[in-house]
Image: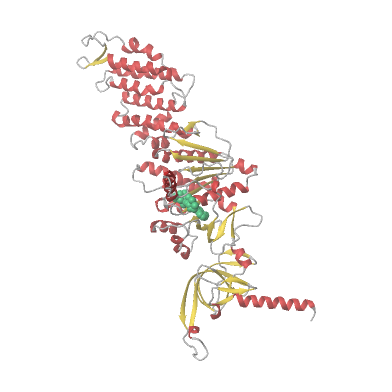
Amino acid sequence: MNVKMIAKTKSIEEELIKESIFIIGHVLSVDGRIIKIKLNKNKNHSHILYEGKTVKNVSVGSYIKVVKGFVSIIGKVEGEFTSEEKYYNKEYNKEEAKINRILQVSLFGHFEGTHFKQGIKEMPLIDNECYLLNRDEFNSLHHFYKNGEKTITIGNLTEEPSQKIKIGVNNLFASHIGIFGNTGSGKSNTLAKIYTELFKVFSNNNDFKTKSDFVVVDFNGEYIGDEMITKDKVVYELSTGKKVSKKKYPISKDSIHKTEILSVLLEATEKTQKPFLDRVIRNDFLDDNATFNARVITSIEDTCTSVIDKKDRNLREGLIIELFRDLINLVTDEKKDAITNLKKEVENNLHYHSKNEEYYWDNTNSTNFNNTSPIYTTHLKTLVENLVFKSDEFSKLKLKIVFNYFHEIIKGYSNQEHIGPLIGRMFRKFDMLEKLIDINENTESKNLSIICLRDVNIEMKKIIPLIIAKQLYENKKESDKKSLHIVIDEAHNILSTMSQRESETWKDYRLETFEEIIKEGRKFGVFLTIASQRPYDISATIISQLHNYFIHRLINDNDINAVEKAVAYLDKLSFQSIPILSVGSCFVAGLASDIPVKVDIDLLEMEKRPNSGTVNLEGAWNSELTQNNKDIQPIIN
Ligand SMILES: Nc1ncnc2c1ncn2[C@@H]1O[C@H](COP(=O)(O)OP(=O)(O)OP(=O)(O)O)[C@@H](O)[C@H]1O
Ligand SMILES: [Mg+2]
């Protein structure tokens, strides 16, 4: 035998040894995609030895390969049980040998050459041999990207920690992503991890910076740290409280001038107040800057003279007082005193004589009715003409609402009782909104924005993300940028279908907006990433349209069911183990991974970790204790 032949026989021998070691049993039955495998009796150990190394033997959750001629079919072990041998010879065997070990396996893919492909082309036959996967096959099964594609590493396979899990950037980020899990299960860390990795991979890529935008809605101030995700970002730390917003979010005039948005903001009623707001928006009488102040003054004159001249019993002088009261907040600071005095003048002097059905002007003698000369021209005109009104967009909008209201009341188009409450709410709501946004067409040039809503009150926490998402979505539809990624941690805050405190219209509009982004966004390159501890609360339309899921530990049955209904990618066995996942460990399922895998997500370094760590009460209290102990003087004997 020459050297070549010896080598060849040796390699065949090695192959045979390998096969004999990796073979685990034979197919016993085939029922749809579920097959049963009878294990060889000598394979009842947890590990087997191969080339001096231990290889993990089959167990529930592991993968096996069924060989049928040239085809290798891959399945996952879903259950294991035993059966007893019917015919067995006592003389030759030990008692335990009559027990057969049977595996239930669900088939899901096959190998083409060395590449794993999802789906099955051929079913196995009874008695086909079944094998453990070798290292290469195992690697190939967990190879979730095409060669040459950019990837991010998210962690290690839980069951085989030496296996790093890398995911193709395109499959993950050109998709809607859902991250679910109970509080403290590691969602925020997972969310931060995938985006931190993404920004790391593309840190020197200019196209990445100019062609894609990322916006994180951060309800708890977890992502505002300097090192979070990337240094190169804009942070909008908004506040409705005593703290002033460090940087207000720029919103274009068009985004606010929307009936839907204004109705939601001002909690307008569907039948009367919403149509009123619609009329306000369509009215452009204050839009021209050159004539703005003059037009406001004419409108005041019109309102006053209409009330006075109309002498309508129902339109009493109170209406004029109401007008000046509403306008106090809308004049420039220097004119505040002037308009306050004007209001007082009217309160003191303008009276109505119901018998004569006339107004008169006097503060000394209530029987002096002669003074019916044009009241406005004589007593108010010059004072009013002196006023200067604020001309920023917010003030303009408020003025428009105020004058439309008075106009419609006087003309009898609208009922004061219907629209009045809206005007009452308007100033308070706009005050809050003004603390958070700037009406401004320019947006920052950085491609990552963090919108921190930690110090924003509940009312605005709900509406701000809606206004921003709507604006971003509309702008993206028209721009030539490649993609927009809206990331919402604690998404149940705005995507909940459960909240009973809010009106139906508002709930519908809010959900419709996000459902539209989920349904249509992909076409325009708009992708949503949501993280939530209450998937059950979130609209089913939204959950079921996500493409990639990271599922951490969930305990509540409703939550598990909600995920189970929506996630077609996950097998039964995986679902059953959702309540027993450990912190940081999650199932990754969807477009980005060919098969659902259980991954231990890498914990980010301290300064890159979302600022949400569980409070260490004992530590906090102990520091106090040690402090107190220090004050106690040691007793010296
Ligand atoms: N991958 C991980 N590996 C190890 N520990 C982790 C991992 N992820 C999170 N943790 C730990 O769990 C804690 C909570 O994590 P995280 O804030 O991400 O949870 P969460 O699911 O977002 O909770 P919440 O719903 O309250 O926001 C972290 O402070 C960290 O110590
Ligand atoms: Mg969190």
Which residue sits at x=30%, y=32%? 418
Locate residue 86, reporting x and y percent.
Answer: 46, 86
Q: Quadrant of residue 448?
A: top right
Which residue sits at x=44%, y=45%? 630
What scheme was used to colour the molecule? Answer: secondary structure
* Residue 511 visible at all: no
Which residue sits at x=30%, y=22%? 319
Left-right relation of 625 to 208? left
* Residue 55 visible at all: yes
- The N terminus - image quarter: bottom right
Left-right relation of 294 to 22? left
Q: Residue furthest bottom?
A: 91
Q: Quadrant of residue 349?
A: top left
Nearer to the camera, 542 or 435: 435
Nearer to the camera, 637 or 611: 637
Q: Residue furthest right?
A: 2
Locate residue 24, reporting x and y percent.
Answer: 56, 76
**For the image shown, how many numbered marks are present on the structure?**
0
Nearer to the camera, 93 or 87: 93
Asked if residue 305 is positioned above or below residue 248 in the image, the reply reads: above
Asked if residue 159 is positioned above or below residue 607 in the image, the reply reads: below
Locate residue 288, reporting x and y percent.
Answer: 48, 22
Locate residue 450, reporting x and y percent.
Answer: 52, 41
Q: Residue furthest left?
A: 355
Asked if residue 520 is positioned above or below residue 593 in the image, the reply reads: above
